[in-house]
Amino acid sequence: MNNQIKSTIRGAWKALLGKNVAETLFFYADETELRWGPFTFNGLKEIEKWATELGQRIPKMGLMEKCFKVDGNKAILRFVLSVTLSNKIRGLLPGIGSYELKRGKILREEVEFLSGVVVIRRQDAKLFYTNVESSMI
């Protein structure tokens, strides 16, 4: 049972990170409640819209699992999400996902992001500080 729950959650993440919206929806129950940071999405139609828009806004995402615990039909996943935005700014967002499954599908998912880190190159930092200084004059 533990392996099946982990496989379902990992499958949902893999599909989402690969921008495969149809496959992402496969892992969710019709009546799923998804909380992603401050946003809540109810049902497959809202999750489909969210997954589509997320893929458009964040061109590249990756996930590194830190800790994965299963207890009955519930699971907790601690992770670091790496993102690259369309303007090439990269970030690392640690988070915690709480899951409840029913009949092999995700019924509830709540993802909370912790303080993250923006990763920039030296030349980007120089450009950023030059722009900030010139806007303060």
Image (tube, rainbow, N blue to C red):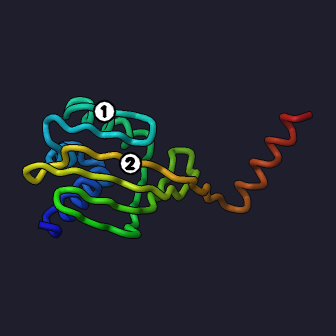
Q: In this view, does 42 lie to the left or right of 128?
A: left
Q: Is residue 60 left or right of residue 21?
A: right
Relative image position of residue 93 (x, y in whole percent): 50, 55
Disc 1 is placed on an element classified as: strand
Disc assigned to residue 41: 1
Number of marks present in the image shown:
2
- In-image side of 28 versus 51 (left or right): left
| Residue occupying image coordinates x 24% and y 53% | 12
Residue 50 image offset from top left, x and y in percent: 33, 35
- The residue closer to the viewer here, 72 or 30, is 72
Residue lying furthest front:
72
Residue at left offset 44%, top offset 45%: 58
Q: Which mark is residue 111?
A: 2
**Mark 2 neighbour density, 10 Å: few (under 14) some (14–19) many (20 or more):** some
Residue 8 in percent (x, y) is at 18, 58
At a point 61% along the width and 55% down the height, the residue shown is 118
10 Å crowding of disc 1: few (<14), some (14-19), many (20+): some
Q: Which residue does the image show at 32% across and 59% down from the upper left?
A: 76
Name of the residue lying farthest toward the right: 137
The quadrant the C terminus occupies is top right
Distance in Å between CA atoms under marks 2 and 1: 12 Å
Q: Position of residue 101 (x, y in %)?
A: 17, 51
Q: What element carries label 2?
A: strand
Q: Nearer the viewer, residue 8 or 136?
A: 8
Residue 115 vs 53, above or below: the answer is below
Residue type highlighted by circle 1: Phe
**In the rendered image, which quarter contains the N terminus?**
bottom left
**Amino acid type assigned to the residue bearing label 2 in the image:** Val
Q: From the viewer's side, name the closer residue of 13 and 40.
A: 40
- Give the mark nearest the N terminus, 2 or 1: 1
* Residue found at the very far left of the displayed protein: 103
